Image: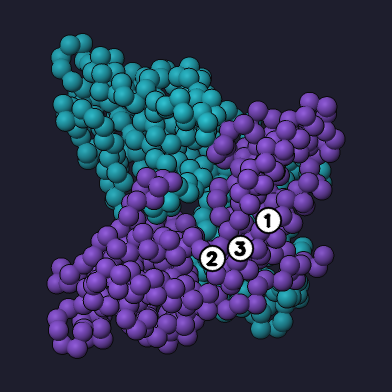
Chain colours: A cyan, B purple
């Protein structure tokens, strides 16, 4: 396989279209909800994207990964953004951080607003420091006061953690709704569009191929870390998946019984444009099942297939 | 090169000895400082290690990396610890988080206190919920009240961020000193012991070898991400360096002028037992310098050598 080309064709869909489709479905779901509740068909969804972090007190900046709700709606890869969607019209706005000229030394020539408008296919783009004014002017309900802001606040039932509602200077002048958005947006994310399914299928294909590569190269005496290295190298070198969606779990022997073993000292998952797939598989490092291993493997396989057939 | 062995021998020093040496130098430096200031030779250094984080509101847990001051003194690889050093005696104690039995499902059989005492070569080990009581009983100055706690509080001049002083339930009963420890511990970290130098040399050797591997395999048409993949694969597969000390910067063309370009879409650094090295190098992707490239390269080399000779 050539080192400079991908062996698996990435989906043809424009990433910006995927996220524009997600915004449309959210606005439609919110309109349906407000109509059913007899509430006015107005207001603005406002989300705050992730911010750049440093490691403890140091200047080490881990590679930025966007917050997933914000990624779902806007697909923005840079830190420090806000995004708004007008519920009635579906009109979308991105707010980009205003960078100091010195920032260019560290991060390159700053992108201008038209770049973000184009790149992420939103209807308009402003700077974060214009947020309050833009929301007031652009979206004010024909002079009838400040628009109602629908903010994201709710509990992630896997982690028990709460999402952080958007917050900006001057927000105290706006009315906010903290309860409507989270369950509706979360429900939107459960049903995937065809374009999203294509992205997930691609992440799945890349992961599967990398798993097969590990199976080809595994041999007794290798360390778990080395198996993870082979997986990551294959996905990044040949398929452009530079990061895994979760901490890799690549475990041998007794370690395989630990669900979140990540020392690798741990199944590995790939992410493509924020879409990911999770594959777990088990096999003998020397390529041959012992009788005991075959009994356990076939029992697990039967249990798995029973679950799948009951779901259909 | 065999895939299952390291080509570079890691330093022979026991990691626990490296950190024990660091604790000894800190206690000696604090005693010298207190003596010079006419203050009593007593009190306890108390540091809080890093805690496990989740990504935004999700249950995704990025691989834990210890806070560097805590790593320097204790070398602990797990989250949720505290560490103490008695200034007069040099006596050291680790406090491990008390895990629930359910934790074993996710993270494996919990390690017991003697494991941590052995592994990190401290004088004793307790649980975090015993902290206040242990500090009071073990370290109280022969019945003369609570010991003074020296906590880490100070500004990182690279980032402008402040380190977070240790905090635990019951700390309000203790007197604390927030100004003495940070400058002295920071100064200790500047002068490296022979064992530390050996670790840094090893991180340097691994980085250098991985750079050479990239130089061997680079060719026009490859992406920056692929160069990063080759670097990371070599360091992790052959040398056991599973993570880089900084976000990789692997930049071609104009991107090379951006200091912290990390899209790679961005010189790469390796970390070995918390010790790291930073190498930056530039070369033509096709293996041949043009006349212009040679002029710039040689001018940069001359400037670099001038700086080095002035430092000697």
Q: Find disc 2 in the rendering and name its residue.
A: B192
Label 2: chain? Answer: B
At x 62%, y 40%, the residue is B266
Q: Secondary structure at mark 2?
A: loop
Q: Secondary structure at mark 3?
A: helix
Q: Which mark is residue A10?
A: none
User: Which x, y percent locates residue A189?
Assistant: 42, 41
> Mark 1 Cα within 10 Å, few/some/many (few <14, many 20+)?
many
- Have a look at marks 2 and 3 and say if they share a chain: yes
Depth check: give the residue in front, A227 or A197.
A227
Q: Find disc 3 in the rendering and name its residue.
A: B200
- Have a look at marks 3 and 1 and say if they share a chain: yes
> As displayed, is residue B194 above or below residue B226?
below
Depth check: give the residue in front, A136 or B122.
B122
Say whether marks 3 and 1 touch (CB < 8 Å): no
At x 75%, y 43%, the residue is A7
């Amino acid at each position: 396989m050539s080192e400079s080309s991908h062996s698996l064709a990435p989906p043809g869909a424009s990433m910006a279209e995927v996220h524009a489709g997600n915004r449309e479905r959210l606005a439609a779901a919110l309109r349906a909800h407000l109509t059913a509740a007899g509430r006015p068909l107005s207001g603005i969804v406002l989300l705050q994207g992730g911010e750049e972090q440093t490691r403890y007190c140091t200047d080490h900046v881990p590679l930025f990964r966007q917050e997933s709700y914000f990624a779902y709606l806007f697909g923005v890869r840079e830190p420090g953004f806000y995004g708004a969607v007008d519920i009635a019209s579906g009109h979308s706005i991105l707010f980009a951080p205003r960078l100091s000229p010195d920032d260019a030394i560290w991060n390159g020539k700053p992108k201008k607003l038209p770049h973000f408008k184009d790149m992420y296919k939103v209807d308009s783009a402003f700077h974060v420091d214009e947020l309050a004014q833009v929301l007031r002017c652009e979206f004010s309900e024909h002079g009838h006061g400040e628009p109602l802001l629908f903010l994201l606040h709710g509990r992630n039932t896997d982690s028990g953690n709460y999402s952080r509602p958007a917050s900006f200077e001057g927000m105290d002048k706006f009315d906010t709704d903290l309860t409507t958005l989270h369950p509706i947006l979360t429900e939107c994310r459960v049903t995937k569009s065809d374009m999203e399914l294509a992205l997930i299928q691609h992440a799945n294909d890349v992961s599967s191929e990398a798993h097969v590569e590990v199976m080809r190269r595994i041999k007794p005496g290798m360390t778990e870390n080395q198996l993870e290295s082979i997986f990551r190298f294959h996905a990044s070198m040949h398929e452009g998946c530079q990061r895994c969606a979760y901490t890799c779990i690549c475990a041998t022997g007794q370690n395989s019984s630990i669900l979140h073993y990540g020392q690798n000292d741990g199944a590995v998952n790939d992410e493509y444009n924020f879409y990911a797939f999770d594959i777990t598989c088990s096999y003998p490092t020397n390529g041959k099942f012992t009788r005991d291993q075959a009994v356990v493997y076939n029992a697990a396989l039967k249990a798995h297939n029973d679950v799948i057939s009951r779901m259909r």
